[in-house]
Image: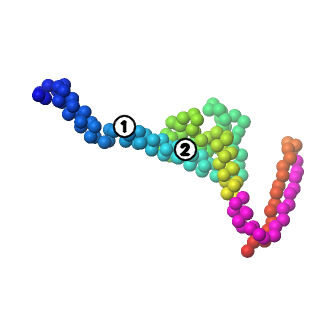
Amino acid sequence: MGKDPNSLHNNAQRAYVDLMNQAQHIKVSLDRQATQKISANRLRLKTSIDVVRWLSFQGCAFRDHDESSGSKNRGKFLELLSLLASYDEKVENVLKSAPQNASYTSSTIQKEILQIYASRVRNVIREEISDRKFSIIVDEARNESKKEQMEIILRFVDK
């Protein structure tokens, strides 16, 4: 019994060793893959958040009229994202391997991130003003392209 490498005993012995080897267990393998996907998604999203944060703090426009892959100028958001990827190999690999529906670079994602920042800024302003007296000044003007632009100024006395 067991002299032939393909005998029932040897096959059962190999199956037992494989079963006891937890590193090859299907649940462990699936958990490892899920953890890798989660960390890749977090890195993609964090990179997009950093780019949105930088562009918004600088008061820059995000997009251009042609954001296709063959365009020479794809807009500040995508160009800055590719610049960050060129300096970090992890970011580059994660951005290149991103599925089409989870790249976190679309205009809707950019707007959602901006809305979150805007909400946080409004909350800080509300907390700072609290019940103090304030005034609002609104000014509206047309620019050279005949578009109306509104400026809102909030004045209050701080502590």
Picture layout, residue 9 above or below residue 30: above
Q: Is residue 148 left or right of residue 21?
A: right
**Which residue is identified by label 2?**
44
The CA distance from mark 1 to mark 2 is 27 Å
Check disc 1 and give the amino acid type.
Ile
Q: Which residue is drawn at 41% across and 42% down?
A: 31
| Scheme by which the image is coloured | rainbow
Which quarter shows the C terminus? bottom right
Crowd around label 2: few <14 · some 14–19 · many ≥20 (10 Å): many
Instruction: Report whether residue 87 is seen.
Output: no
Q: Residue at x 21, y 29 (%)?
A: 11
Q: Where is residue 77 in the image (x, y as percent from the top left)?
A: 64, 43
**Which residue is identified by label 1?**
26
Q: What stretch is highlighted in magenta?
A: 122-142
Instruction: Report whether residue 41 is seen.
Output: yes
Which quarter shows the N terminus? top left
Magenta run includes residue 141: yes
Q: Which residue is drawn at 33% across and 39% down?
A: 25
Q: Position of residue 99 (x, y in %)?
A: 54, 35
